[in-house]
């Protein structure tokens, strides 16, 4: 999860493509508009590409991050919080500083059960005094204040720590049940569960409507590891995609998970979904326009 200080108050300059593919029309715009009669346009998602999200520090080679993790585990205060889950607290934090965090974790459990129907085993949690130590132990950009790599990592001295905890716990719930990708669904679902609202900025929504990142990028990227300006656009697009897909759908986020093909096959390294069954392509611009009209500019 990005720190909100990283978000500029004007639209960021359009970054270049993140992979060797040219940007194309808005997400799903090349799909048939009559999903009920059109042939399937299923997109296969290689879940193994997301294994990095479960490696210490989100690093391609987790060796150094694993060593740092062992050091933190030895030096941080060790608290139990639920079941087998352990809470490791930065010794620079005062005694009792972790108590509000326990409340946020309980809230995160309730939200994932209520909105996703998922109740995973509690993760290990690392609570940091500042983001300098958090990013020192990870392969993320320096604006990250929370992330999930099989354990939940969060900086406590922030006003948005509650949203960070719920967001990262949503990743834990999804990944614990074999739902690793696509990346836009991981992030968009987590943002909606955490009730984040910073992305509802008309300028940024207009940017992703008119110049969206390629769908391949939205499926495969780890936003924590992108440059800050790219991460911001990724999150805005992911949240808007999920918001539009569940808009007016009584099944909500659970229905989206079903449409994404979240099943036992995902845990075995392979998943697929048909975007045309999730969102009528002709509704994309209209939905974004509706989000823009109801959003407040960021000053």
Image (tube, rainbow, N blue to C red):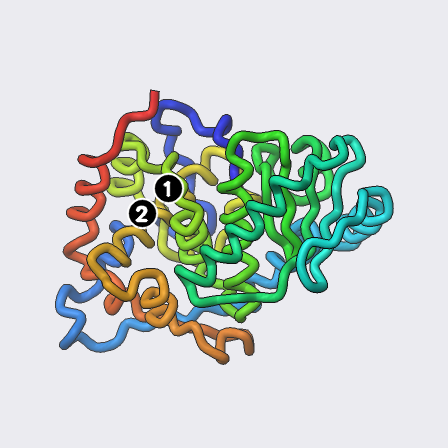
Of residues 294 and 201, the one nearer the viewer is 294
Residue at the image point whose x is 18% and y is 42% from the top: 290
The residue carrying pointer 2 sits among few (fewer than 14), some (14 to 19) or many (20 or more) residues within 10 Å by Cα, namely: many
Residue at the image point whose x is 35% and y is 23% from the top: 10
Residue at which label 1 appears: 236
- Residue 29 is labelled as none
Residue at the image point whose x is 58% and y is 50% from the top: 105
Residue at which label 2 appears: 240
Q: Are marks 1 and 2 in contact (CB under 8 Å)?
A: yes
The answer to which image quadrant residue 116 occupies is bottom left
| Left or right of 132, for residue 14 | left
Distance between mark 1 and mark 2 Cα atoms: 6 Å
On screen, 93 above or below 174? above
Total labels drawn: 2
Q: Is residue 128 in sight in this rendering?
A: yes
The answer to which image quadrant residue 258 occupies is bottom left
């Amino acid at each position: 999860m990005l720190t909100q200080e990283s978000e500029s108050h004007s639209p960021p300059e359009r970054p270049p493509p993140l992979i060797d593919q040219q940007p194309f029309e808005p997400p799903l715009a090349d799909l048939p508009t009559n999903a009920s009669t059109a042939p399937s346009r299923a997109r296969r998602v290689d879940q193994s590409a997301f294994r990095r999200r479960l490696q210490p520090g989100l690093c391609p080679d987790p060796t150094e991050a694993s060593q740092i993790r062992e050091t933190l585990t030895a030096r941080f205060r060790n608290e139990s919080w639920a079941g087998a889950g352990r809470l490791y607290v930065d010794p620079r934090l005062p005694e009792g500083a972790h108590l509000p965090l326990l409340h946020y974790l309980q809230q995160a459990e309730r939200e994932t059960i209520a909105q996703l129907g998922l109740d995973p085993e509690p993760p290990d949690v690392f609570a940091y005094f500042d983001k300098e130590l958090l990013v020192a132990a990870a392969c993320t950009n320096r604006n990250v204040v929370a992330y999930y790599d099989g354990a939940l990592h969060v900086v406590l001295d922030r006003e948005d720590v509650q949203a960070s905890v719920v967001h990262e716990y949503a990743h834990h719930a999804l990944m614990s049940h074999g739902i690793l990708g696509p990346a836009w669904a991981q992030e968009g679902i987590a943002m909606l569960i955490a009730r984040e609202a910073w992305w509802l900025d008309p300028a940024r929504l207009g940017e992703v409507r008119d110049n969206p990142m390629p769908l391949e990028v939205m499926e495969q990227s780890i936003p924590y590891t992108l440059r800050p300006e790219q991460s911001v656009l990724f999150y805005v697009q992911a949240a808007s995609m999920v918001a539009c897909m569940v808009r007016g759908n009584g099944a909500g986020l659970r229905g989206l998970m079903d449409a994404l093909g979240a099943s036992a096959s995902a845990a075995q390294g392979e998943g697929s979904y048909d975007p045309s069954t999730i969102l009528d392509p002709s509704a994309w611009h209209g939905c974004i326009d509706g989000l823009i009209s109801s959003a407040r500019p960021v000053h």
